[in-house]
Structure formats: structure tokens, C-alpha cells
Image (cartoon, rainbow, N blue to C red):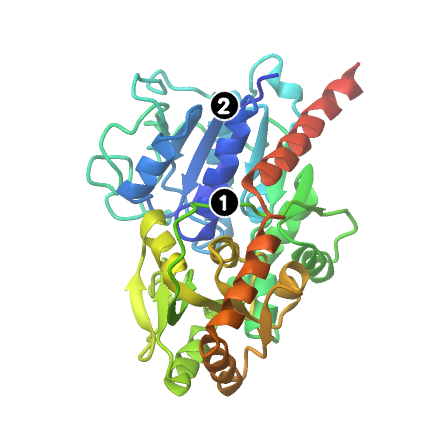
Amino acid sequence: MTRRIMLTADAVGGVWRQCLELAAGLTARGGPVLLAVMGPHPSREQFEEVSALSGCEVAVTDLPLDWTADSPEMLRHASMRLAGLAGAWRADSIQLHAPALAGMGGAAGGQARAGGVRGVRVDSRFRGNDEGGARDDGGTPGEGGTPGGGGSPGGGGTAGEGGLRDDGGLLSVRSWPAPVVAMAHSCVGTWWRAVRGGDLPPDLAWRAEMTRCGLLNADVVAAPSQSFADELVAFYRLKRPVHVIPNGAQPIGMPRTPMPHALTAGRLWDAGKNIATLDEAAALCGVPVRAAGSVHGPNGASIVARHLRLLGNLGPAALACEYAHAAVFVSVARYEPFGLAVLEAAQAGCALLLSDIPTYRELWSGAAGFVDPSDPAAVAAMLRDMIADPASCARRGELARRRALCFTADAMAAATWALHRDLVAAPAMAAE
């Protein structure tokens, strides 16, 4: 049975990779999929990745992310615009990558779809073209998009990536036109508790409240690990179940040629990644530590690393080369709902050195070394000892590779497809 699923995503970190893997798996099961990209525009390379997916359209919305929006009103407006896009595209179900987006109003539960989507005004300029993909170009200037937004050439993507276009800013509704899955990849409340502690500052308090509203309002809530699901339930005092669908990835399969150095990867600018501790450990251990990812975030956050070998943002092929050459992959994150980079490194056969936090213990116990993320000397000692013993590193890497077999892209897609299938079927059964 064909099901039209709209996924929201951003191009900033691991969510992009997870959403591409998911979109590929869903379209293979009878999509199509509309990928609605929020925040900064995807790079040209990212556009090329998504354009290679059969049955997947992309809409660059220029809407702010939940953690870059300037106010609750701006975030509610983003939700209404997304709801309008979903209705005009005739989505059967919607998956939001940030629960805060789900809190604007009651989900329609699929009831409006039989006779059209109520409240959606479709301008005659909202049209398709022959080039595939989609764009939502009606974002209001200043809503957290990148300079040169609005979908014009030079605004961050390639000209003519089009498909659906919203040029008049007319597609805003006040309730979701189809059932909603809120997939929590992270949230500011649990991030703050793990990284900073204490009371939330006002700028994060309203975001956490909107996240709680979204968690209550969505038809289904899901998370990529049981540990993170438990954190959500505890922090937001939820009385509803949180489904667990682990992230998955398709191994690239590059030949392994390990060298005596370590690698980390991800959003280096994010304080939750604890790069300052790893930088200090790199100064102590005498082992080269390479770091892939940006040191500047779209929210203005940044880090300075004096002892890591900074590689910048890498595309999938270049990053796969780094995994293939690293003897050890290290993450000393204080906050990690899943850790897609760890999975990719494990698939490549890297030995794993991870911070001793609940998520990593849940996913990688017996297949990784664990260390106190607040102790740079301990991190340095373990890195030095692991790399000094190549045979042990190889054994550890094989344990990690075998554990990674539990987290496949196909399993993630199958579980997500089943969740959406049951969600869409529920209101139809209730109406009979």
C-alpha cells in the first residue's frame, strides 16, 4: 500500500544522515517521502545525496529549528507552515524530528484527508515541475533561515532543485492535517540537565515547555534509545509510552587500513560533545586525535581546539576514509541520545572509547571501553594504552563491528514503517 510520509529534518548534524537512511527505507516500502528541511540550507553535496533517492522529494523551508527560533511565536509559525506543506502535499502521516514542532494544536488524526485538508489555502503558484524535489520558498525573512534564503539561486542550494513551491506564504494552518509522530532526537531540557545542570535559563525554559506540549500533543512519541526515552519521561513527567526505534545506518564498506591515531566526529561546537575535555586529553596522551565536524554552530556556539587535528565538515566518502584509517574512535560526550557517528565508526571496525553515560552503556556494553568524561587524564591514558596495542585494538574493533549489526538502516525503516502503518490505520478503524 502506498503511504505518503512527510519527514522533517535539518542539515546540521547526524539527523540529516538518519533521515536520508530512513527516507530510502520508506520509499523502498512504498513511499513517496517528502523531506522538509529546516534551518540552514543543505550543502550542494547534501542536495546531491537526497536527489539520488528515488521517490523522495525535498522542500527547503527556510524555517527555524526549535533551538534557533527567537520566540515561541516564531516556532508556532514554523509548525503551521509545516502543517500547510503536509496538507498541500497530501501526506498520510507526518514525522517531526523535533517534538516542539508538534505542540501547536490538535492532530487531525487523518480525518481531514478524505475530503481535502481544511484550512489550507493553496495558491495557484504552488505547483510541481519536472525536476523532482520540492521547495517551500515563502519563509518570512528573519525566521532563522540562512542569508539569501527564500529559495532563490545562490541561497544555499542549487537552482531548480524545485518541485512544490510556496511562493506566497499562504500555507499556514492551525492543526496537523494527518497523524503525527514526534521523533525526539534530542531536546534542550535534557541537554541542559546533562551538560550544565541547575535551572533552565529563560531562553531554554520556553523551548522546553514547547517540547513538553509537543510530546503531549503528538499522536505517537519515539526516541532512538531506551535511555533517552527514560530521560524524556522523567524530565517532562510523561504518562504516555515512548516508542524506541534505534537509529540505523548502511555501512559504506571501505577497506580497513588502521593507523596509530584516534578520531572523533560530530557537531564539535556542541558543548554536549565535551570537546574541551578531549582537546585536553589530546595534549596529554601523545597520540594524534583527529576531529571531523564544524567548530561553529548555527546558534552562534563555537569552540577552540588547540590540540586536536581539525578536519572540518567532511562528506560521506571522506568521513568513511577517516573511519577506515582510525585505530580508535573516541567520544567523551556528556549528552548523547544515540550517537550515529559511533555507529558508523563501529561499522568500519574502529575500537571504541566512549564516555560512561547511560546511552552508550545501553548500546555498546561489552563492545567498547568506557571512561569518565570529566577526567581528561583518564581519557588520555586509555587512548594511549589502546593505540599502543594494535592486536587488542583489532579485537575491540571486531566486537564493535558485530554489535553494529544490531543497528541497521533496514531495521530502522521497518520499525518506522510499521509505526506509521498502525498510526494511519487507527483512525480509519475508529471511523468504521
State left or right for residue 425 relative to residue 280: right
Vertical order, 361 against 19 (above or below): below
The residue tagged 2 is 32
Callout 1 secondary element? helix
Asked whether 393 or 418 is in front, the reply is 393
Query: Residue 402: where, in percent of width, then height?
Result: 59, 53
What is the quadrant of the C terminus in the image?
top right
Give the residue at x 32% y 27%.
167
Q: Nearer the viewer, residue 209 or 66?
A: 66
Alpha carbon separation for disc pair 1 and 2 = 17 Å
Q: Visible in this render: residue 97?
A: yes
- Residue at 51% across / 43% down in the picture? 76
Left or right: 114 in relation to 162? right
**Above or below for 411 versus 207:** above
Tag shown at residue 18 = 1
- The image's mark for residue 65 is none
Q: Secondary structure at mark 2?
A: loop
Badge 1: residue crowd in 10 Å (few <14, some 14–19, many ≥20): some
Residue at point 47%, 22% (across, down):
89
The N terminus is located in which quarter? top right
